[in-house]
Image (cartoon, rainbow, N blue to C red):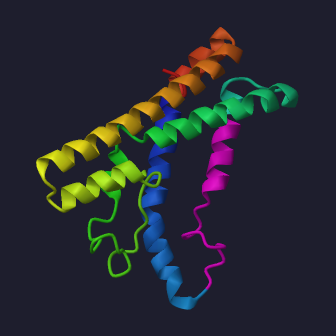
Amino acid sequence: MKVNQLLTICGIAAALCLSAGSVSAQNDNGGDNGGGGRRGNFDPAQMQQRMMENIRGDLGFTNDTDWNAVQPLFQKVMDARRDVGFGGGMGRMFRNRNRNNGDQAGGNNRPNFGPQPSQEAEALQKAIDDNAPKAQLKAALAKYQTSQKAKQAKLVTAQETLRKVLTPKQEAQATLLGLLE
């Protein structure tokens, strides 16, 4: 049942991210949208706070002292997972394809989904877009793969550090929530 709840939350978050551009476009016609620079009413910090509260409740942390001690470890895992990306670049499928050589000013104002691409990902995409020679593509791909391996190693380290402070029941719940592998 918890997995279904997590999937529902992820689906809602994705829908909010994808719809934020259209809400922002409607609000951009009249000046300040009251969002303090945010697109629409979507507040990533507020969503992250809710996610942390859900994790705290799901894993049974009722003592503030205990939670405050482990919350940074959960945050490191979530940050590392975000940096690794969704399925090796799944978020890139939702980016603006009408870039005009990297300039998005004349294209769709819809926000990108997921984290900002790394320099290695941008260099690889540029090589693809520019129909770079085979050797240049291979070099860019190798750099990208190396950066992804480093990010994956950082995630594994963060997960192992978190795993050390959890009870077996909490570890099982964190695994079902997708925080641990």
Location of residue 162 in the rendering, given as x and y in whole percent from the top left corner: 65, 22
Q: How many marks?
A: 0
Name the residue at 34% across, 60% down: 95
Q: Quadrant of residue 72?
A: top right
Horizontal placement of 20 versus 140: left or right? right
Q: Looking at the picture, tell me which residue is in the foreground, 173 or 8.
A: 173
Q: Quadrant of residue 85?
A: top left
Residue 178 visible in the snapshot: no
Horizontal placement of 139 versus 161: left or right? left
Q: Which residues are magenta?
A: 32-54
Q: Residue furthest bottom?
A: 30
Relative to 110, say whether 136 is above or below.
Answer: above
Relative to 98, say whether 94 is above or below.
Answer: above
Name the residue at 49% across, 42% down: 83
Name the residue at 27% across, 55% down: 125
Q: Is 94 one of the magenta-colored residues?
A: no
Residue 37 visible in the snapshot: yes
Q: Looking at the picture, tell me which residue is in the foreground, 174 or 79.
A: 79
Location of residue 51 in the rendering, given as x and y in whole percent from the top left corner: 63, 41
Name the residue at 48% across, 81% down: 26
Q: Is 41 one of the magenta-colored residues?
A: yes
